[in-house]
Image (cartoon, helix red, strand yellow):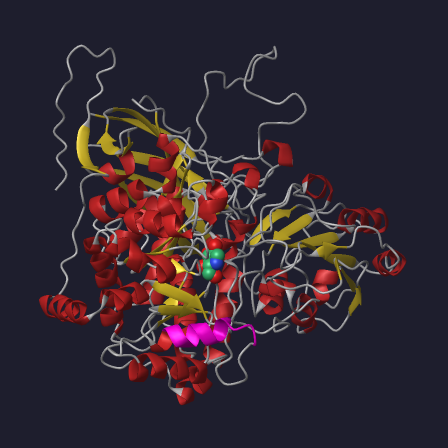
Amino acid sequence: MINLSIPKTAGCLLIICLVHINSIVKAQNSVKEPVVQEEKINSLLQKMTLEEKVGQMNQYNGFWEITGPAPKDGDAKKKYDHLRKGMVGAVLNVKGTENVRKLQEIAVKETRLGIPLLFGYDVIHGHKTLFPIPLGEAASWDLAAIETSARTAAIEASAAGINWTFAPMVDITRDARWGRVMEGAGEDTYLGTKIGLARIKGFQGDDLAANNTIIACAKHFAGYGFAEAGRDYNTVDVGTSTLYNTILPPFKAAVEAGVQTVMNSFNTLNGVPATGNKWLQRDILKDAWKFNGFVVSDWGSGMEMIDHGFAANLKQVAEQSANAGSDMDMESYAYVNHLKELVETGKVDIKLVDDAVRRILRVKYKLGLFDDPYKYCDAAREKELIYNPAHAVAALDVAKRSIVLLKNTYVKGSGRPLLPLAKNQQKIGVIGALANDKNSPLGSWRIGSDDNTAVSVLEGLKKYSSNLTYAKGADLAIGKTDFINEVKINETDTSGFKEAIQLASNSDMVIMVLGEHGFQSGEGRSRTKLNLPGVQQQLLEAVYAVNKNIVLVLMNGRPLAITWADENIPSIVETWQLGSQTGHAIAQVLYGDYNPSGKLPMTFPRSVGQVPVYYNTLNTGRPGPKPEVFWSHYGDESNKPLYPFGFGLSYTSFAYSNLVINDANPAAVKVTATVTNTGKLDGEEVAQLYMRDKVASVVRPVKELKGFSKFSLKAGEARQVSFTLTAAELGFYDNTGTFVLEPGDFDLMIGGNSVEGVKGSFTLK
Ligand code: NOJ
C-alpha cells in the first residue's frame, strides 16, 4: 500500500513534501519461482562443465543451411562443431519446423547434457502475415488490437519453430530522423508503456509452456531511442530526469509484467556502452527491479565496445560484458572464445557465470523445452497456421484502426469534404508508385515474411470502384531494394509526370499515394530530411496545378514534415505501412466503411529544424510569446508542430464538456468529462487525459498523458469518461531515481488530442 500521509518539511519556501513510494533501489515486486524448477536448474548446473556453462551464454546466428549445403567459409563447420560440444545456448534467424528440428536434435541428442536451444527471431509486426509497423499500430491506441497483433505473430512464429522474439522495442524516441521510430510506440512514455505491455502479453500469453506462446524481449536497454541527431547507433547523452522519467519506465513495467528477456543496446550512456554497463544491467535491472529472466546483448554490441573505445580487445569485451550482467552474447564471439579463461584466471567470478546460466536455463524450463524440445516443430501445425485466413482478418482489423485522418476540409463548391468517397463511380485518378506497390506497405523489419505479399492500395480500391485509372507519375526507388542495402531514391526522373497530369486533368478527383519506401525506415535508416522523398513533392504540386480535389494517402515509417501539403491539399490520410492487408484497410477507410479512429503517437514537425519536437516538453524560463526576440522560439518557424501528439480526425466530430474533478481522496483523484458525438456518423474516439504538475522539485512537463480510453459513440450519443489518478500517475522520479509524490497544484485536461480539451485544476494536499 502506498502511504500518502505527507510529512511537512520545515523551512521550505514551497512546502515540498516527498513521499518515497518506491525507488529504483527498491524492488516493487519480487517474483517467486517454483521450488521444483529452481532445484532442477541447480542440479543441472552442478553437472555442467565451465565450457558448457559458457556455451549456454553463447548465441549464434544460424546462417547455416541445415537442409541444404552449408556455406563454404568454414564458419558454419565451426558453429556445428560448437553446437555438438554444447557450446551454444541459443541461435537466431533459423526458422521453419524442419530447420529448427534438425538443430534442436543436435543439441538434444548429440551434446553431453542434451540442453535444448532457444530459437530467437525478430518477429516485430507479424511473422508471415504482417500487421502494421509498430508505430502505425501505436496510432490505433487500441491495446486489445495491439495484443491481438502480437498474439497472432506468436502463433505463426511458434508454428515455424521460433520460441523467442526480439520484441517489443520499448525505446521512447522524440526524433523522427531516427529510422527505428517505426519499430516503437512513439514519443510518449505512458502510451509506450501500455503498448509494450500489450505486446508482451500477446507474445507470452498466459502460459509460456503452451506451444503457441513465445518469450518476448524488451529492448534496447537503455537510451537507444535518444541517438544524437537521430543518427542510428550514435552517442546518447540524456539527463538524469529524462532517463528516469522517460526512458526507463517502459522497461520497469515490462519486468514487472514478467518479460523473460531484455536486450541491451548499441549506444553508450554517459560514456559507458550499455553492454558493459553494470549500473544499468545489474544495479537497476537485476538488483533494484528483481528481473528474473536474462539479458541478451544486441548483435555484436559486445564487440563494438572496442570501436567505442571502452575495451581494448575481445577478451576485455568478455570480461566487461559478463561482469556488467550481459548474460548472453549475440554474435560477438567474446564469451565462447574468452570467458572460460577469464573465470579460470579470476577475472570473472564463477558466481556471475552461474547466475547468467541459471537465468537462461530458467527461461528454457518455463518454455517447457526440457519436457518437449520439439514442441514448436510440428510440420502439420506449421502448414495450418502460416498465413491462416483468420490472421488476415485480424491484420485487416488492426490495419484500419491504425489509420489517422489528418485533414478533411470542405472543397469549394461541393459542400462536403472529399472523404469519405462517394460510392457513385466518380472518375478517380490514382497516382504514385506506392499505390501499385505490394512490397513497401509491408514496411521494414519483417525478415520472416515474403516479399510483395501486401494487398496494394490499387488492388484495395478496385474492390470498390471500376472507374479507376492509375498512373505511376514517377518511380520512388531505383534498382534493387532490400533489407541490407541503402535504398536509392529517384531524385531526377520525372518522365512519367505528363501521363499523371493528364490523368488528373481528366478525373473528377485524384488519390495520390506518396511517402517513403518500405526500407527507408528501420535499423540503420536515418534521414536528415523529413520531406516526401525524391520527386514526389514536385509531382504532388504538378497534379495539384490541374486538379485540386486530391486525397493524399501517406505511406511512411516515420512522421513527415508535409507542411505544403497541409496548407494546400484538402484531405490527408496517414496510413504508415499497414502490412499484408494494406490496400483493403485503406480502401475501407477512404470509402467510409470504417470511420478512421487513429491518433498520432508522435508529433509531426513543421520542419526538420524543429526536431526534437514533442508535446511533453518543459516550459523553459521564457515560454513567450513576447513582442521582442528574447524568448524561446525560432525566427523563421513557429514553435508549434504540424500535427500534435494525440491528434487524429474522424468522419464525425466529438465535443468535450463538463470536466469534474473529485479530489476528496488524494490517493485516487477521480476525473470525469462528457464526450458527445456531435456529427452525423457513428465513430470511435480516443479520450486522452493530460496532467501538469505545476510546481515540483524537478520541473515537470507542460503536459503529460496520464490516461486514455477508446470507445464507440453513435451519432448524437454522449457518454462520460472517467479516469483515476493515483500516486503512480501523480508522482515522478527525482534525480536520485526515487519515485516521489509532491503535494501542490495540478492542471488537468481531457480531450481528443494533446492540445484541445476541457480543463480544470485541483490541489493535492
Ligand atoms: C540488431 C537490432 O538492433 C536488434 O533490435 C535485433 O533484435 C538484432 N539485431 C537481431 O536481429
Residue 567, placed above or below residue 743: below
Q: In what quadrant of the picture does the N terminus appear?
A: top left
Q: Position of residue 661 (x, y in %)?
A: 28, 34
In the displayed structure image, the side of residue 238 where residue 424 appears, left or right: right
User: What is the chief secondary structure element of the magenta stretch?
Assistant: helix
Q: Foreground residue, 211 or 686?
A: 211
Q: Position of residue 636 (x, y in %)?
A: 68, 24
Residue under the image location 77 percent in, 57 percent down: 509
Q: In what quadrant of the picture does the C terminus appear?
A: top left
Dividing the picture into quadrants, the one containing residue 69 is: bottom right
Q: Position of residue 624 (x, y in %)?
A: 53, 17
Q: Foreground residue, 594 or 431?
A: 431
Res 619 seen here: yes
Residue under the image location 42 percent in, 44 percent down: 311
* Residue lying furthest bottom: 380
Residue 118, placed above or below residue 186: below
Q: Which residues are magenta?
A: 72-82
The answer to if 321 sits in the magenta stretch is no
Dividing the picture into quadrants, the one containing residue 496 is: bottom right
